Amino acid sequence: EVQLLESGGGLAQPGGSLRLSCAASGFTFSSYAMSWVRQAPGKGLEWVSTISGSGVTTYYADSVKGRFTFSRDNSKNTLYLQMNSLRAEDTAVYYCAKDGAYDHFFQHWGQGTLVTVSS
Amino acid sequence: EILMTQSPATLSVSPGERATLSCRASQSVSSDLAWYQQKPGQAPRLLIYGASTRATDISARFSGSGSGTEFTLTISSLQSEDFAVYYCQQYNNWPPLTFGGGTKVEIK
């Protein structure tokens, strides 16, 4: 059974930093691209970032490019999202997701972790 | 960037009735279209990918159709557990991966 467990959310001040983690199990982790998707309170879904299975290639939404860094440790089956220069508009539930085998839809989702950016 | 537009924003349906949800892409996405269901307080769940392929363990009540720019999600006979918000997502031309704004299916 695929399991994705996010952690690291919480309250951060504008301009501050947080690091999210996502622990994965139940599949061959290094074989799959992985993604982060966020959802602001009461709003729809927004793609944030995708990383290749090897971790060599990353893609970012324009809204987070240059501020967020997505990485993975395939020896630990864990993803990391380093979020710097946080803004109020980054307030959201952040979901990690396992991509499809060959395509970038989101086959499995974690339960999400809430990030609140406020002074 | 491909813009995804879902309609209607809210759909009121009686249990047992059919629900038809629409998703339109601003340019062709071929069949690279997924549908998700999200219930309050829960993560989204993949229903359909490749425009018409049901994901694992998804009820046959759910069916997807379309290609190019026009897509439909049909729920053949609404059950109580189907009342939720539904999102479409294209993965043909990215980054960015883009979602529609969602359709809320509510009890009539």
Image: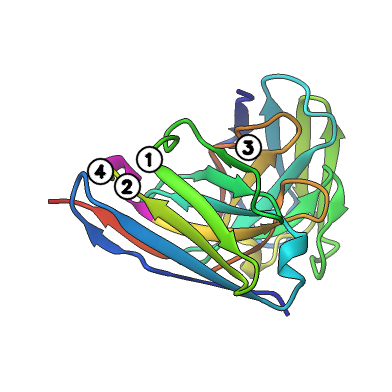
For disc 1, the marked residue is A67
For disc 3, the marked residue is B97
Q: Kindly identify the amino acid type of the residue bearing the numbered disc 4.
A: Ala
- Label 1 close to label 2 by CB (< 8 Å): yes
At 80% from the left and 38% from the top, the residue drawn is B32
Residue stretch rendered in magenta on the structure: A87-92
Mark 4, Cα crowd under 10 Å, few <14 / some 14-19 / many 20+, is: some
Task: Please tell me whether mark 4 sits on a helix, a strand or a loop.
Answer: helix
Query: On the rendered image, what quadrant is the N terminus of chain A found in?
Result: bottom right
Q: x, y (%) of residue A100?
A: 77, 54
Relative horizontal placement of residue B63, taking residue A24 as reference (left or right): right
Relative horizontal placement of residue A104, taking residue A42 as reference (left or right): right
Q: Is residue A91 magenta?
A: yes
For disc 2, the marked residue is A84
The subunit letter for the residue under badge 1 reads: A
Same subunit under labels 3 and 1? no
For disc 4, the marked residue is A88
Q: Kindly identify the amino acid type of the residue bearing the numbered disc 3.
A: Leu
As measured in the structure, the alpha-carbon distance from the residue carrying label 4 to the one carrying label 2 is 12 Å
The subunit letter for the residue under badge 4 reads: A
Front of the two marks 1 and 4 = 1
- Label 4 close to label 3 by CB (< 8 Å): no
Q: Nearer the viewer, residue B74 or B86?
A: B86
Disc number placed over residue B88 in the picture, else none? none
Q: Nearer the viewer, residue B100 or A24?
A: A24
As measured in the structure, the alpha-carbon distance from the residue carrying label 1 to the one carrying label 4 is 14 Å
As measured in the structure, the alpha-carbon distance from the residue carrying label 3 to the one carrying label 1 is 19 Å
